[in-house]
Image (cartoon, rainbow, N blue to C red):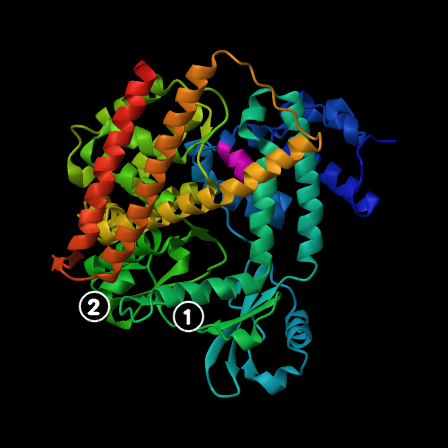
Amino acid sequence: MPRFIPWGPAFRRFKRSRQIVGILVKYGFGQVIDQIRAWEQINIECRIFHRCDRKIAGLEFGERVRLAIQELGPTFIKMGQMLSTRPDMVPPDIIKELEKLQDRIPPFPSQIAKKTVEEELNRPLEEVFASFDEEPIAAASLSQVHRARLKKGQEVVAKIRRPDIVETIEADMAIMRWLAGIVERRVPEARFLNVVGLVDELHSDIKKELDFRTEANNLVRYAHNFRGSRELKVPRVYEELCTPKLLVLEYIDGINISKIQRLTDEGYDLKLIARRLSDILFESVLEHGFFHADPHPGNVFVMPNNVVCLLDFGMMGTLSQVEKSNLASIVTGIATRDEKLTTRALLDLAIKRDRLDEQQFQMDVSRHLQRYAYVPLNRLRLGEMLQDELRLITTHHLRFPTNLVWVTKAIATVENVTSRLDPQINMIEYIKPFAEGMLSRQFNPKQEIRELGTAALEFLDLLKDLPYELRSAIRRLREGHARLEVEQVGQEAARKTLTRVTNHLAVAIVIAALLVGSSLLVVSKLPPLVSHISIIGLTGFGIAAIMGLYLVVSALRSDES
């Protein structure tokens, strides 16, 4: 009996495992399978690992990886496409091949598509659609798309999930996780990469894409962020017709942005389109913190009046306020060759696994930036520079959060598209106003006052809870659930220390009260005012500053004595 522990139908998984191993061997990866001794788990004889076709063996490593993934099927194709967005973990030559992965999956029968629509809507097709095209206009690994017309006349597309795709993906991901676990146990270098964690992350992302309600919500949110925009078109979602397996959207009649000759022939302004696409990306990243994570040319169309339209909102990224701020600092540091600013922002964002030599890291960042010191500004590529920094942090056993990796990939992708439309456009100069605006908003005085007031209120809440916590501690002591050990060194010294601490605490409470009161006066704009700021509130801040200085000096003197 094999030692492989089955999940789901045992025979199907066992058979699929052997098939996967066989395909990997076919494309010259038998040595890897042999190294992790996967053959022991599925009863395959070791000698098959040397069976590699000579023609295949002569291909480049990255090309063999791509061909193997294509033959392995939808789950692995989707995984390969996602890995192509991870320059922090995958070498550039392999990424270049993975970007060529296409969902060359034959469409499933239109009868099954129609049946799925009827089951999802719980009514006959004729009640919803005036017409429904038999032939799909697109077929991918997870779904296929049919053009249709609603009863009220609107032209739409129906995106329909493939039958049994969930079961297929779950089975393949379980096998993939099993292989990842073996790799981590048998290959020490793979432990840092957290291969099992990466598989789990990819699995989570694919599951989100499988539920079309998530994509519908993404479309609605993105459209709301750009409401009123004349530069961007987001397809309308017919939410009442959307389910986990069905997504109905407005049909977009536009020109693919990669068809530059056609755009030129029909009189479109290529430079304006390039600027608009850049505006959309940077506004969504640095202002909204919600961006399209896969803006490759196939997902970007151009409509009349040079309006840009984005499609396929299955993969979206989100950034917190802190992440947006640090990303703006990284971009500003790269643009100004400020190694300290760049290093600090990278370290603030990176996920640390081992002890880090920060001095060496800053030196390496400096060397990276110096490589571009004498490169003309119009030849600098922001996406490549960001991806270089990602690869650098990997060499120091650091990792970037996935959403930040997606940002760098999105910037690089859009940069490639816009440079074909307008060779003179420079992303570093273009993003600087967005980054500077982000940083200036971070230091908005009113926002700082509000945050200071919030901190002061939290401090007061802590003081309010202090008596209860003390009573609780005393009660635990009295009941014998806790023990207080006191070492008496000198009563007089202890008395002086207690008095000093009490005085400092009293001053701190007064300072907190002044900060809260002054913040409320400034926000409410209580007259008299100077530059729209309450004089009384400013006076309170001044008194609090003086008392705070006294408290600091007193504490320092206490330490010296």
Residue 186: give x, y in percent of width and height: 66, 21
Quick one: SS at disc 2?
Answer: loop
Residue 301: give x, y in percent of width and height: 35, 63
What residue is rendered at 40% in x and 63% in y? Answer: 222
What residue is rendered at 58% in x and 25% in y? Answer: 191
Q: Which residues are magenta?
A: 62-66
Say which quadrant the C terminus sits in.
Answer: top left
Figure check: 243 above or below 168: below
Nearer to me, 280 or 467:
467
> Are dots 1 and 2 in contact, CB under 8 Å?
no
Residue 312: give x, y in percent of width and height: 46, 60
Nearer to me, 217 or 301:
217
Figure check: 314 above or below 432: below
Q: Is residue 65 magenta?
A: yes
Tell us which disc is closer to us: 1 or 2: 1
Give the residue at mark 1.
Answer: 235
Give the residue at mark 2.
Answer: 267
